[in-house]
C-alpha cells in the first residue's frame, strides 16, 4: 500500500527516530478533593481524579509520538483506521464476512487474504506463537510491552476446553522465551476452558445463593464477594437445580485446567489476566478468578488478576467489596479496569427479560465510574499490595489517572500500575504515556485469521463508537506522514 501512495524512492528516504527519552515528570501540585461515597457499605476513595499537569503528558507531538513507527507501518495504520471510521464500509465488511459468500471456495480465500493484509495485520500480533513473539519484540524495542492473547472462542465441550487449555499453556511458554518484562500478562478467557453451559448454570446458582443464602453449593470454594446489594439478578428467574454429577465432573476438570495454568504462571512469574465477558456468565468467571487468587496470590505482586467492567452500574460497589475482602484475608489482588465491550447484547438481554439495562444510563456515568474506580485502585496500590491495569483508549481517563498516580506517589515505572490499549488502537495515548515514563502494554491477540475473525468482527461492531473516536490518532498520523513526506522531499 505504501508504494502505491508514495514512490519507493521517496519512501526509502522517509526517516524516523528510533530513540526517545522519557519526559521528565512535571511536579504536580494537585490537592485531593473528597469524592461522595457510592456505597453505604464501604468508604469512598479519598479523592477524585484531576487532569495531569500540562507538561506531564504530551499527546500532540506527533513527531515524538510516532518516532518508533516505520513509515510503511504508519501508512497502513492510518489507512486501516480511516477505513474503520467509515460506517457503511464497516457494515458492508461485517455483512460480507458473516455471509454465505464465505463458504464459496476461491472467494473465501480472497476475502481472508484481504482481511489478513489489512485489518488482521493492524489489530493482531500474528498467526502463531513465534509470529506473536516477533511482534512483541518489535513493540518492546519501541518502549511498550505486550499482553499475549491466544485467540479462541467460547468452548462448548471438554474437548474444545482441553485444546484451548494447551494453547494457553503454550502462550506462557512463549512469554517465558521473550526478553524479561516484554510481556506484562498472559490473558485467559474462562469461557474457553470451561463449557459455556456450565458457566451459565454456575452463575445461576451463585445468583440464587446471593438471593437465598440457605442454598448450599457443595462445590463452592472460598472466594471474595461476587455481588453487591445493587447487583441485578434478573438472569435467574427460578431456583436452579443443583449441579448434576456430570456437571460436577466437568467443573472439576475446568478447575483443574485453571489451577494448572495458574501454577504455570506462578512458576514463570507471569501475571495471568482473566478477561470479563457477558453478565450471564460473569458471576462464574469472577468465582474462578477470586477462588484462584486466594490460592495463588501469595507475594506482594498478584499472579491472578480479574477484570471489572465499569459500564455496569454495580461495578464500583463490587470492586470495593472484593478489594476489602482481599485485604481482610491478606490476599494481594489485581484488577484490570475496562469500560466494557458487550453493551448492545447486555441491553438487549435485559430488555428481553423485562428489566432495565445493567449499564449506566449515560456515557458520562460510565466515564465517571471508570475514573472513580481508577482513583480507588490507585490509592489502594499506593498504600498496599495489589495491582491495577487501566485498559482504556480514553485520553481524558489516561490524563486523570496519570495525575492521580503522581498525586498518590506511585512511581511511573512501577510494577503495580500498567496502562493498556488494544494493539492497533490509540497509539498516541500509548506512546504519550510511555514517553512520560509509565508502563504501557498493548493487548495482542494472535492466531490464524479464521480463528481471530470473531474478535475482529467484535472490535468493528462493539467498538464502533471508539473507532470513530480514533479521529484524534488519525489526525496525528496524517500530520506525521505529512512531516515525513516534506522531510524526504526537501
Ligand atoms: C487492554 C484492553 C483489555 C480489554 N479487556 C476487556 C475485557 O476483558 N472485557 C470487556 O468487556 N472489554 C474489554 N476491553 C474493551 C473495553 O471494554 C473497550 O475498550 C471499551 O468498550 C472502550 O472503552 P474505552 O475505555 O477505550 O473508552 P472510550 O474510547 O471512551 O469508549 C467509550 C465506549 O463506552 C461505551 N459505553 C459505555 N457505557 C456507555 C453508556 N452508558 N452509554 C453509551 N456508551 C457507553 C461506548 O460504546 C463507547 O464506545 C478491553 C480493552 C482494552 C484496551
Image: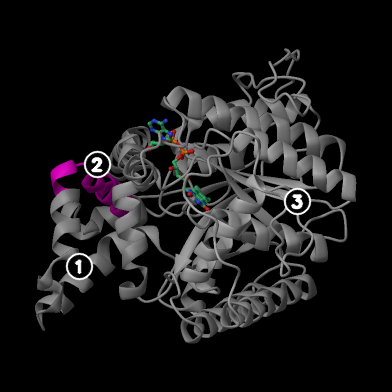
Residue 25 visible within the image: no
Which residue carries the number 3 mark? 224
Left or right of residue 23, residue 368 in this image: left
CB atoms of marks 2 and 1 within 8 Å: no
Q: CA distance from mark 2 to mark 3?
A: 41 Å
Q: How is the image coloured?
A: one colour
Residue found 19% across the figure and 42% down from its top: 86
- Would you say residue 286 sits in the magenta stretch? no
Q: Quadrant of residue 324?
A: top right
| Residue extent of the magenta highlight | 75-89
Indicate which disc, 2 or 1, sits on the residue closer to the N terminus: 2
Number of other residues with Cα within 10 Å of mark 2, as a class: few under 14, some 14 to 19, many 20 or more: many
Number of other residues with Cα within 10 Å of mark 1, as a class: few under 14, some 14 to 19, many 20 or more: few
Q: Residue 114: which disc?
A: 1
Which residue carries the number 2 mark? 85
Looking at the image, residue 136 lies above or below residue 431: below
Q: Residue 59: which disc?
A: none
Residue found 61% across the figure and 82% down from its top: 245
* Label 1 secondary element: helix
Left or right of residue 199, residue 478 in this image: left
Left or right of residue 418, residue 352 in this image: left
Q: For the C terminus, which image quadrant? A: top left
Q: CA distance from mark 2 to mark 1?
A: 18 Å
CB atoms of marks 1 and 3 within 8 Å: no
Foreground of the two, 112 or 489: 112
x, y (%) of residue 359? Answer: 45, 35
Amino acid at each position: 500500500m505504501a508504494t502505491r501512495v508514495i514512490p519507493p524512492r521517496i519512501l526509502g528516504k522517509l526517516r524516523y527516530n528510533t530513540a526517545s527519552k522519557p519526559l521528565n515528570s512535571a511536579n504536580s501540585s494537585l490537592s485531593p478533593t473528597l469524592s461522595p461515597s457510592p456505597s453505604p457499605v464501604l468508604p469512598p476513595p479519598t479523592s477524585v481524579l484531576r487532569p495531569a499537569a500540562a507538561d506531564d503528558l504530551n499527546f500532540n507531538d506527533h513527531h515524538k509520538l510516532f518516532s518508533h513507527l516505520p513509515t510503511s507501518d504508519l501508512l497502513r495504520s492510518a489507512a486501516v483506521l480511516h477505513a474503520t471510521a467509515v460506517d457503511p464500509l464497516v457494515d458492508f465488511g461485517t455483512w460480507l464476512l458473516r455471509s454465505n459468500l464465505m463458504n464459496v471456495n476461491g472467494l473465501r480465500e480472497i476475502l481472508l487474504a484481504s482481511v489478513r493484509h489489512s485489518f488482521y495485520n493492524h489489530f493482531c500480533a500474528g498467526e502463531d506463537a513465534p509470529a506473536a513473539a516477533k511482534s512483541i519484540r518489535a513493540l518492546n524495542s519501541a518502549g511498550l510491552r505486550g499482553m499475549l492473547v491466544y485467540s479462541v472462542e467460547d468452548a462448548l465441550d471438554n474437548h474444545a476446553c482441553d485444546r484451548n487449555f494447551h494453547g494457553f499453556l503454550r502462550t506462557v511458554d512463549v512469554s517465558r522465551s521473550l526478553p524479561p518484562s516484554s510481556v506484562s500478562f498472559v490473558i485467559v478467557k474462562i469461557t474457553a476452558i470451561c463449557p459455556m453451559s456450565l458457566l451459565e448454570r454456575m452463575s445461576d446458582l451463585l445468583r440464587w445463593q446471593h438471593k437465598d443464602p440457605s442454598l448450599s453449593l457443595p462445590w463452592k470454594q472460598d472466594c471474595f464477594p461476587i455481588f453487591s446489594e445493587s447487583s441485578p439478578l434478573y438472569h435467574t428467574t427460578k431456583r436452579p437445580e443443583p449441579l448434576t454429577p456430570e456437571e460436577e465432573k466437568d467443573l472439576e476438570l475446568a478447575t483443574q485446567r485453571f489451577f494448572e495454568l495458574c501454577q504455570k504462571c506462578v512458576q514463570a512469574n507471569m501475571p495471568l489476566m482473566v478477561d470479563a465477558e457477558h453478565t450471564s456468565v460473569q458471576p462464574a468467571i469472577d468465582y474462578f478468578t477470586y477462588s484462584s487468587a486466594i490460592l495463588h496470590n501469595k507475594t506482594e505482586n498478584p499472579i491472578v488478576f480479574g477484570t471489572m467492567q465499569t459500564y455496569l452500574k454495580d461495578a464500583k460497589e463490587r470492586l470495593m467489596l472484593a478489594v476489602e475482602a482481599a485485604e481482610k484475608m491478606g490476599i494481594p489482588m489485581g484488577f484490570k479496569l475496562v469500560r466494557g465491550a458487550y453493551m448492545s447484547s447486555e441491553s438487549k438481554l435485559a430488555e428481553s427479560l423485562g428489566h432495565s439495562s445493567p449499564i449506566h444510563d449515560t456515557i458520562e456515568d460510565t466515564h465517571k465510574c471508570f475514573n472513580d474506580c481508577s482513583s480507588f485502585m490507585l490509592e489502594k496500590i499506593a498504600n498496599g499490595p495489589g495491582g491495577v491495569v487501566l485498559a482504556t483508549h480514553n485520553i481524558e481517563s489516561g490524563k486523570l489517572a496519570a495525575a492521580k498516580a503522581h498525586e498518590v506517589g506511585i512511581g511511573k515505572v512501577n510494577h503495580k500500575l500498567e496502562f493498556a490499549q488494544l494493539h492497533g488502537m490509540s497509539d498516541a495515548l500509548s506512546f504519550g504515556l510511555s514517553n512520560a515514563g509509565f508502563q504501557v502494554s498493548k493487548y495482542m491477540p494472535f492466531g490464524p485469521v479464521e480463528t481471530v475473525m470473531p474478535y475482529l468482527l467484535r472490535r468493528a461492531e462493539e467498538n464502533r463508537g471508539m473507532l470513530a473516536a480514533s479521529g484524534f490518532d488519525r489526525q496525528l498520523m496524517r500530520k506525521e506522514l505529512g512531516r515525513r513526506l516534506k522531510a524526504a522531499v526537501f
